[in-house]
Image: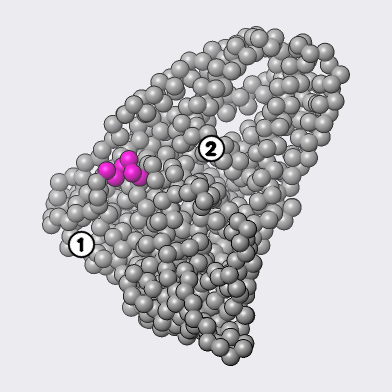
Amino acid sequence: MNSLTETTGSPAPKRQLKPGPRLWAIRVVIVIALIFTVRYFYWRVDATMNPAAKWFFYLFLVAEMLNFIEAALFYFTTWKPSNRHPQPAVTGRTVDVFITTYNEPVSLLRETALCAVSLTYPHKTYLLDDGDRPEVAELALELNCSYISRKDRSDAKAGNLNNALKQTDGEFIVTLDADHVPMPDMIEQLIGFFADPSVGVVQSTQDFYNLDSFQHRTHIEKQRAWQQQELFFSVIQPGKDGYNAAFYCGSPAILRRKALEEIGGFATESITEDMHTGLRLQKKGWKVVYYNQTVARGLAPQTYRGFAMQWHRWGQGAMQVLRKENPIFGRGLSFGQRVNYFASFYFYWMSFQKLIYIATPIFCLLSGIYPLIATPKTFAIYFIPYFLLNIIATASLQGGLRGFWLSEEFNLIKMPVLMTTIAGLFKGETAFKVTPKARDTSARWTEVWLQSLLSIGVIIALAVGAWKLARTAPGGYFFWALVVNIVWAAFYLILLIPVIARAVQHKELRATYRFPNRLDVPVLFGYNSDGGSHVVGRGFARNLNRSGFSLTQKLPIAPGTIVALEIGLPTGTVHAHGRVVRNREFFRGENKRVSSGVIFEQIDPADQDAISKYLFWEIAPRHGSILRLTRKSQTRSQPQAQTRSANT
């Protein structure tokens, strides 16, 4: 890294999470698990050979060892997580906010641009339009953003960013995806870390406002939610940060222009330009800081198809980065950084191992051939402590058994997608595909063919296994071999069925996301009924966005009715006229209610913007607070409030 001679203030301290009782307890469990793992594998190699099927013995043994290596890498990554507290916000710096867009709906882009323009730290906002769309240029003019477009789309998103770099001069650059809506104090929360002149990037967590997406599991009534990327952003990224191996994930983050210029701008040689850029910065000695707080919220894929497309892009890009940068054996990284990068690449290869695991009980129950020979008592003595201790350690790091179980579900639904990403090690250029952000169909059966085929195989194997078990004398080796394989087959079936069903059923019909549930936004409405009388009523808005909402009443409002509205936002009353477009009946206990969907026909654009800001700055954080793992990790790293300012 070039010498940093400018004075930017005292370096921002890096605070490691002081191991409290919980972390120490997990570490103790990990150490004990490692001891029993060594014991287990010594016994497996020494005393369990099946001479009638040596190939099966070695295949399954290797699969077991690969599985434990994944767990060991996870333990290493999360051993010393960082715990960064907010730093005083340095003032007087120039900041450019880059919002990249290609073909996303303008209504979606508007939400991000609107809130980006309203960031409280002095800055310039740029819409980087790779689609060269007149309507985006008009949006930029309306919102007082700068507009940058280009005719060609060379190097996709990275090329778009590099094109903007040449036409701007801010000392710091905020990168936002088209769907990532920032909180008003986003820059203040992040820019203080640049008081340390060695910091090149500050990355924050990726959180999402659509809690009903494919990757979420939400129970509003129980005030509990989980989403598939929580493990990475709440557990793995803080762990990586302990080794200066955190990923730059593109959005939401802020970068030092000088650091980017030193590596020639955003990396263009892979379709994961964010991770690739962060790695190059780290190889040059720059720090990629991870700040575990939600400073913006994006739109998670609503369907399996969008989810699979996103993971395929990440996997292909990761393999391209591995091939081009050689972070495992190349120069410029510490041992801890190398191990952390290897752990991330290794994850994509583990789908092949999981396929062996699922196929094993199917093969055993159908063929009567088993990968090892041991007495039931001896097997229990060696296997159960090894298995349970590693489950306890892994689940504890993931926030509990529920998080562990759901992660395993999603590992299986991602399996065929991740298996194909290995091609990134050998293929040349791959086209960058934008994840769908609006209407999308559910998965076809052909898109989940592998999971479906495995499920059918498991069901057949369970039937055959049950038949064999009924004909086998209890207590002997073959009896317990059948029992063990039946249990594992049932376990995988229970994991597979829910995600397959969700993939083929979950589709997106909305063009724009609506915040569900009662929002405590009072609505006064009036309309003329079919009989000529004027009806006035009160209620609360549900399913609200800048285009409309729904009203829940005992009686329906006829579709086509024009309704006069007064919507009571905390910032003021919104006056509008809307049209009822549909009715939907439902029951709350024994009481029937009718939800009447209303779209705005007449409303001031400034009032629509006020609705958007209220939803993203007030409602989205409130809804997101039920994400248990995110809330727990962010509360732990944010004991006191928020940002302060300091002149440097």
Mark closest to the chain's N terminus, 1 or 2: 1
Q: Most extreme residue toward the bottom, as rendered?
A: 532
- Comparing 61 with 615, the one in front is 615
Residue denoted by label 2: 402
Q: Tell me the residue at 31%/69% (across/down).
A: 118
Q: Tell me the residue at 61%/61% (across/down).
A: 591
Q: In this view, does 59 lie above or below 583?
A: above
Q: Do the residues labelled 1 and 2 touch (CB within 8 Å)?
A: no
Q: In which quarter of the image is the N terminus?
A: top left
Q: Position of residue 375 (x, y in %)?
A: 70, 9
Q: Tell me the residue at 63%/69% (across/down).
A: 584
Q: In the image, is residue 144 part of the stretch drawn in magenta? A: no
The amino acid pointed to by label 2 is Arg
Residue denoted by label 1: 93
Q: In which quarter of the image is the C terminus?
A: bottom left
Q: In this view, does 516 lie above or below 320?
A: below
Q: How is the image coloured?
A: one colour
Give, as a single range, the part of the protein colored magenta: 634-639
